[in-house]
Image (cartoon, grey):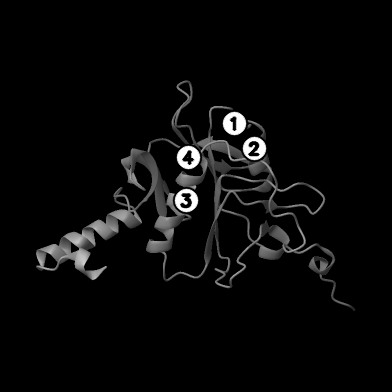
Amino acid sequence: MLDYDYRACMPSSEELLDSDETPVDNELQDLIPGLLKAILAIIWADRMDWFFGVDMGIYSDPYEPAIVPDGFLSLGVERFYDENLRPSYVLWEEEKLPILTLEVVSKKYRNEYSTKKDEYAKLGILYYVIYNPTRRRKPKLEVHKLVNGVYQLQDGNVVWLPEIGLGIGIERGTYQGITREWMYWYNQDGKRFFTPEERAQILAEKLRELGVDPDSLI
C-alpha cells in the first residue's frame, strides 16, 4: 500500500502570493503588533517553538485568498533564521493553527467585528483580540476565547491566556518615543514585560549607579 502525502500536491509558501498593493490603513496597525513581537523576542529569546506574524497572510486553502490579520501568534512551530524567513503562513506546511490573532481597528471598519471574527472562529483559532484605539462606542480591548466553536468575550483589561502562558492588556507607556496607550504582554502576577527601550534605559541606569557612563560605551 502506497503512502499518500497530500501536501506534495499543494502549493508551497514560496509559490503563493505573499504581498499585494493594499495599503496599511493606520500606522498603529503596524506598531502595536510590532511591539508585541519585539517583547516576545526578548522574553522568549531561548524558545525555538514560536512565531509572531505582522500583517502576514495565513493560507488555509490554496484556492482562496489569504486571511491577513494585523498580528498573529503560533506556538509549536519552528523559528526560522535563514535570510528569507517566512513569505507567508501556510497551514498545510506548518500543521499548526495560530493560537491568537489580533486586529487593530482603524477609522474605517474592516469587518473586525463580523466577517473576520467568523473566519477566525471557523478556522478554530483559540483567541481573537480586537484593539479599538479611537471608536468610542466599542470597548478599547476585546479578548475573545473560542468555546465550543463560539467566541466568548473575556472579562478585564489584562486577560490571562493560560494556553500561551502570558497575559495581554493595554496601558499608557512610551514606545519609539511615542507616549500613548499601547498593548503589552503581562506575567501571571499582572506585571507587564518591559519594551526593548525600557530594558535599555534600566541597563543604562544600573551602569550609572556603578559609575559608568553608558554613552561612553557607544
**Residue 3 visible in the shown view:** yes
Left/right of residue 218 with respect to residue 181 in the rendered view: left
Q: Are marks 1 and 2 in contact (CB under 8 Å)?
A: yes
- Distance, label 2 to label 4, CA atoms, is 19 Å
- Whole-percent x and y of residue 178? 35, 41
Image quadrant containing the N terminus? bottom right
Q: Nearer the viewer, residue 146 or 75?
A: 75
Which mark is first along the chain, 3 or 2?
3
Which mark is first along the chain, 4 or 2?
4
**Residue 159 visible in the shown view:** no
Circle 2: residue type: Lys
- Distance, label 2 to label 3, CA atoms, is 20 Å
Res. 28 mark: 4
Circle 1: residue type: Tyr
| Residue occupied by mark 1 | 113
- Whole-percent x and y of residue 155? 42, 35
| Residue occupied by mark 2 | 116
Which mark is first along the chain, 4 or 1?
4
Q: Which type of secondary structure does the marked residue at label 3 adopt?
A: helix
Q: Is residue 132 above or below residue 47?
A: above
Circle 3: residue type: Gly
Left/right of residue 91 with respect to residue 205 in the rendered view: right
- Distance, label 1 to label 2, CA atoms, is 7 Å
Q: Nearer the viewer, mark 1 or mark 4?
A: 4
